[in-house]
Image: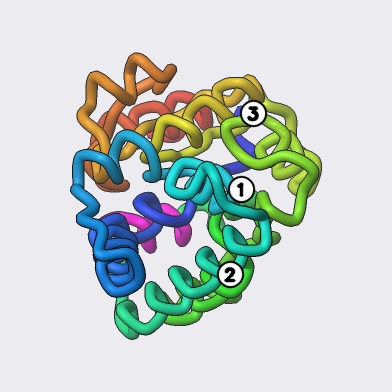
């Protein structure tokens, strides 16, 4: 059975890690004179909610400072991303889901303003039944709650769903919710994704491994 597809946003629907890294590097250099490396971003920031990011960057500073910095960082990201491209094969998959009555939603640690901005730029604002923003829930990824909430929103069980993630926190959340999850190798090495629980690692949504799983579940030839 396949009744639901649940998608992360950053690094999954579109490849944005380089832009998030650039936004952070610019702000930390301008405000702190701090050099921030890609390796540090990959290890400590990619896929994390802003609250976790700020606790890592500024462990000694207040929540007020964290919230203000996170907002400046996301504003900078939106300025840097007036155009984005959907991941290869994404539109094909969304069209297939619509044709076969498979419900789709977004489950993201990004703030609401970013999610709306990215979906609008991608031309996907009307394609998803719901957009679940983890910071509007009691717990963000890597807790499974955002994905459990996504299943509830779509009226689906975990065993009749597939999820798509590119980060360790996201995979931890989706796998923890009991969902068979494909890791996209946009921001992490394939072995890192497999170690985090990915069912398979794919390059994009055209990957034959993904379509074999979809056809197996639907018994489509």
Q: Image height check: is 37 above or below 217?
A: below
Tell me the element at label 1: loop
Measured as percent of width and height from the top left, residue 3 is found at 65, 39
Residue that carries the numbered disc 1 in the rendered image: 102
Q: In percent of the image, x 31 and y 79: which residue is there?
A: 80
- Could you say which quadrant of the image residue 164 lies in? top left
> Of circles 2 and 3, which is in front?
2
Measured as percent of width and height from the top left, residue 174 is found at 57, 30
Residue that carries the numbered disc 3 in the rendered image: 160
Residue that carries the numbered disc 2 in the rendered image: 68
- Picture disc at residue 185: none
Mark 1, other Cα within 10 Å: few <14 / some 14–19 / many ≥20: some
Tell me the element at label 3: helix
Q: Image height check: is 185 above or below 119?
A: above
Please provide the residue range marked out in magenta: 87-95
**Looking at this view, is 151 or 167 the one in front?**
167
- Image quadrant holding the N terminus, namely top right
> Of circles 2 and 1, which is in front?
2
Residue 147 in the magenta stretch? The answer is: no
What number of labels is visible?
3
Tell me the element at label 2: helix
């Amino acid at each position: 059975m396949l009744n639901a597809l649940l998608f992360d946003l950053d690094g999954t629907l579109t490849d944005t890690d380089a832009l998030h890294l650039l936004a952070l590097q610019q702000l930390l250099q301008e405000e702190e004179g701090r050099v921030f490396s890609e390796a540090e971003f990959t290890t400590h920031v990619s896929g994390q909610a802003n609250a976790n990011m700020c606790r890592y960057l500024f462990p000694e500073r207040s929540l007020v400072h964290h919230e203000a910095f996170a907002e400046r960082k996301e504003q900078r990201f939106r300025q840097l991303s007036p155009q984005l491209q959907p991941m290869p094969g994404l539109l094909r998959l969304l069209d297939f889901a619509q044709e076969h009555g498979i419900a789709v939603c977004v489950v993201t640690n990004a703030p609401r303003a970013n999610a709306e901005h990215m979906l609008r730029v991608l031309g996907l604002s009307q394609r998803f039944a719901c957009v679940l923003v983890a910071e509007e829930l009691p717990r963000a990824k890597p807790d499974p709650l955002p994905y459990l909430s996504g299943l509830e929103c779509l009226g689906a069980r975990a065993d009749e769903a597939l999820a798509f993630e590119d980060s360790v926190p996201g995979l931890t959340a989706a796998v923890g919710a009991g969902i068979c999850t494909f890791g996209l190798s946009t921001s992490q090495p394939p072995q890192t994704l497999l170690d985090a629980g990915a069912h398979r690692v794919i390059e994009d949504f055209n990957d034959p491994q993904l379509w074999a799983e979809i056809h197996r579940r639907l018994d489509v030839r």
